[in-house]
Image: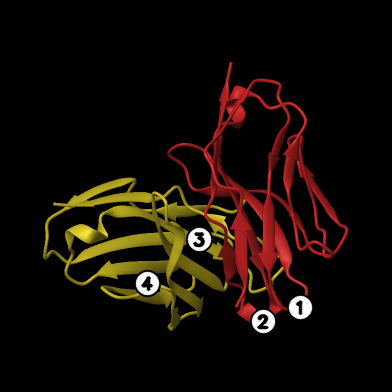
Chain colours: A yellow, B red
Amino acid sequence: DVKVTQSSRYLVKRTGEKVFLECVQDMDHENMFWYRQDPGLGLRLIYFSYDVKMKEKGDIPEGYSVSREKKERFSLILESASTNQTSMYLCASSWPLSNQPQHFGDGTRLSIL
Amino acid sequence: GDSVTQMEGPVTLSEEAFLTINCTYTATGYPSLFWYVQYPGEGLQLLLKATKADDKGSNKGFEATYRKETTSFHLEKGSVQVSDSAVYFCALSNNTNAGKSTFGDGTTLTVKP
């Protein structure tokens, strides 16, 4: 079974802090994704990576950056956290084929105070 | 671009009732279609998929048929249980989209005993 592990289930940070969310997958997937999930807004793609050191902006990249130095690890960085970044963050991975599903972690609920 | 429209929720049913959650899509070419389920406090997990027209995906008593003529992929279950209470997401993935998926907004289902 594919395992996607997010480093924290719950995280509380302060405005202006630099925040790192980590995600690790164990299936050698090329693709990895970061989403945020907010009530009434569904899933919104923040960033997408299709290989080591390769990344592509999603629908809402402002205020975020990502790092993928190793194939199994994809990090989301909030450069200077703000209260409007309080949300549920979901990481996913997949093969680069349209008939393959994405595999999700359990999410990190991030609160910015 | 690609899009997915899901039946708005929330949906509340009594145990053993019949469930339908409507999903229609707009896409170029021949996308693969997916239903994901998100139980409280967890990430999304694949429920079922169909990769070509007239395919029927099924899992845990849920079914959905890929209807190209109506661009639909409606989710059905004959008799729901309290444990089916969750958020359900319809999604598509296209060959033209480098492995990314387009998600619907999600439908919250609550099943009462």
Q: Vertically, is B84 above or below B71?
A: above
Mark sitting on residue A60? 4
Identified by mark 2, the residue type is Thr
Please state the chain letter of the residue tagged with numbered disc 3 in the rendered image: A
Given residues B80 and A55, the one toward you in this image is: B80
Mark sitting on residue B29? 1
Mark 2, residue position: B96
Q: Earlier in the sequence, mark 4 or mark 3?
A: 4
Given residues A94 and A43, the one toward you in this image is: A43
Mark sitting on residue A78? none
Determine the CA span between mark 2 and mark 1.
8 Å
Mark 3, residue position: A92
What is the x, y in percent for residue A101?
A: 65, 60
Determine the CA span between mark 4 and mark 2.
21 Å
Q: Residue at x 68, y 64 (%)?
A: B25
Tell me the quadrant of the picture where the C terminus of chain B can be found: top right
Determine the CA span between mark 2 and mark 3.
19 Å
Q: Are marks 1 and 4 in contact (CB under 8 Å)?
A: no
What is the x, y in percent for residue B16?
A: 71, 21
Identified by mark 4, the residue type is Ile
* Residue mark closest to the camera, 3 vs 1: 1
Q: Are marks 2 and 1 in contact (CB under 8 Å)?
A: yes
How many discs appear? 4
What is the x, y in percent for residue B106?
A: 54, 50
- Which structural element holds mark 4? loop
